[in-house]
Amino acid sequence: MAGKRNNGKFIVLEGVDNCGKTTQAGRLAASLKRQGYEVLPVREPGGTKVSEKIRRILLSRESNIDARTEVFLYLAARAQVTAEKIAPALATGKIVIADRYHLSTYAYQIGGRRMPAEVVKAADHFARHAIRPDITFILDITPAESRKRMTLAGKKPDRIEKEKSAFFARIRQYYRLATRTEKNTILLSGRGNPDALAAEIEMKTLELFKGQ
Ligand SMILES: Nc1ncnc2c1ncn2[C@@H]1O[C@H](COP(=O)(O)OP(=O)(O)OP(=O)(O)O)[C@@H](O)[C@H]1O
Ligand SMILES: [Mg+2]
């Protein structure tokens, strides 16, 4: 059943666009697999057929999406990946590594789009079956660094990435504050060397396994 947890662990990578989430989620998943852990990597929005379809709608530059519609699309994608993939994996003792989860909705929709916090948080809680990450790593970079990385990689900005820099500054601020208000969050500089960052994330994850 969806809200049920057994002894699985839920690790999330968070932060503004281009902070290194996908890089670090991939490295952590690969390293834990090498050590014999059963790992399920997921990305948000996405991770199931339906959620990936919603992702395409959300990120397409062709989409005209109202801020409220956007909230529900992200939550719809989350409800599906939680029910179909995350909850069953946790119930069978797997380690789920998610590239974004609910804190992204808080930071982008509440912090960035200024949607009402109580409404978004209540709907999100419902969408994710009240499941909480055991640990969330927030990789922190400035909006300028984010833009620089996008240019360096020759990436064309998606619907969200083409927003103004004030929007990203609010999101970054929300993430930084969240490390004080949200449980089990760890703020790390995303500017560090990727190997050193991967080692730190892995060490903290293994500490979590030992502690429980
Ligand atoms: N620690 C780092 N230092 C410098 N550059 C990095 C670092 N980590 C990742 N990058 C580079 O930054 C870019 C974005 O990395 P990545 O795709 O992992 O970020 P992301 O947070 O998943 O981005 P998005 O939000 O767009 O999914 C890539 O070109 C990557 O090579
Ligand atoms: Mg990514």
Image (spheres, helix red, strand yellow):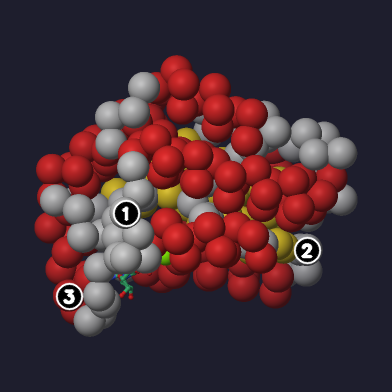
Inspect the image, locate mark 3, and give the three-letter code of the amino acid beneath it.
Thr
In space, the residues marked 3 and 1 are separated at their CA atoms by 25 Å
> Label 3 neighbourhood size at 10 Å, few (<14), some (14-19), many (20+)?
few
- Quadrant of the image containing the N terminus: top right
Q: Position of residue 181 (x, y in %)?
A: 41, 23
Secondary structure state at the residue bearing disc 1? loop
- Quadrant of the image containing the C terminus: top right
Q: Are marks 2 and 1 in contact (CB under 8 Å)?
A: no
Q: Are marks 3 and 2 in contact (CB under 8 Å)?
A: no
In space, the residues marked 2 and 1 are separated at their CA atoms by 40 Å
Inspect the image, locate mark 2, and give the three-letter code of the amino acid beneath it.
Glu
Above or below, 145 against 212 in this view is: below
Q: Position of residue 66 (x, y in %)?
A: 33, 42
Above or below, 40 against 82 in this view is: below
Residue on which disc 1 sits:
64
Residue on which disc 2 sits:
38
Q: Is residue 152 left or right of residue 204?
A: left
Q: Nearer the viewer, residue 137 or 99?
A: 99
Residue on which disc 3 sits:
151
Secondary structure state at the residue bearing disc 3? helix
Q: Which numbered disc covers residue 183? A: none
